[in-house]
Amino acid sequence: MPDRPAYNASTIDWSRIRAYAQRVAREARTPAEKGISYTTTEYQTVTKQVEVKHGAFNLFTRVENKSERVAVSKCVDVVGSHWVLERRHHHIECNTKERTYTNQETTHEQHYVVLLADGSLKKVILMETENMNTAHGRSTFFATHQHHLRDLSASDVEAMDFEKRHSEYGTHGRGTKNWGDREPGKQLLSHAKGVGLTKALKRLLPG
């Protein structure tokens, strides 16, 4: 069992971790995964020219500009080829009920620690928010997507030194419900900070 005071007294050796990550990217035996991307929908205002009939018996025609909003699909590239070192997920469901309507908004987060082909370490968070609204007997649904990409932080590294723990609070369809394994458990698995990340990198090397 790792010693918690000794772990707390340790520090993350960023120079060693970055050098090791670059070596792993060069020598990895495991094929890299394809890039991470997602498709989102944007609404753009488009102006079109239309012919409008007017006058007595609609005998005359004039050209008018007409604006309308159209949905445009867009592919968003997050990162290129990579190796996933850790996956976590988190979900939150918020329910609102009034006399004439109900609304349910659910956000799904996928968290990845990845090694890129250039040897850099990144944290990727993909977010999808689903919104279901029911009012006067009619339901509408829409979903939005976004992402966050940043360098690995100390808390990201330390989370990999602890067990994964699934937690769940609340009830589906009522109030607020949270579930997932985004937050690390309490059981310490490493004797020093950064060992969990180092082990994940090592698994990509031959032998």
Image: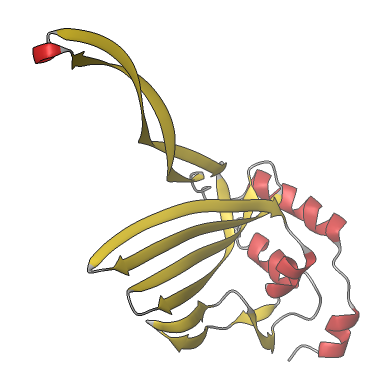
Residue placed furthest toward the front: 56
Q: Is residue 2 above or below residue 204?
A: below
Asked if 18 appears above or below 85 in the picture, the reply is above
Quadrant of the frame with the N terminus: bottom right
Task: Please provide percent x and percent y for residue 77.
Answer: 52, 40
On the image, which quarter does residue 190 sit in? bottom right
The answer to which quarter of the image holds residue 140 is bottom left
Q: Nearer the viewer, residue 165 or 83?
A: 165
Residue 53 versus residue 114: which sits nearer the camera?
Answer: 53
Q: Residue 67, relative to residue 108: is it above or below? A: above
Quick one: 31 or 193, which is closer to the camera? 193
In the drawing, does residue 117 fall left or right of residue 32? right
Residue 189 visible? The answer is: yes
On the image, the x and y values in percent for residue 136 come to 25, 68
Name the outermost residue toward the right. Answer: 9
x, y percent for residue 35: 51, 44
Tell me the residue at 12%/12% (across/down).
Answer: 56
Instruction: From this view, report whether residue 42 is shown above or below residue 45.
Output: below
Q: Is residue 136 left or right of residue 90?
A: left
Identify which residue is drawn at 36% across, 74% down: 102
Residue positioned 53% across, 51% down in the render? 146
Q: Is there any visible trace of residue 30 in the rendered image? A: no
Q: Position of residue 113 (x, y in %)?
A: 63, 60
Report how many numbered discs are placed on residues in the image. Answer: 0
Quadrant the C terminus occupies: bottom right
Residue positioned 45% across, 38% down in the render: 75
Residue 28 or residue 114, whichever sits in front: 114
* Colouring chosen for the image of the structure: secondary structure
Q: Residue furthest left?
A: 57
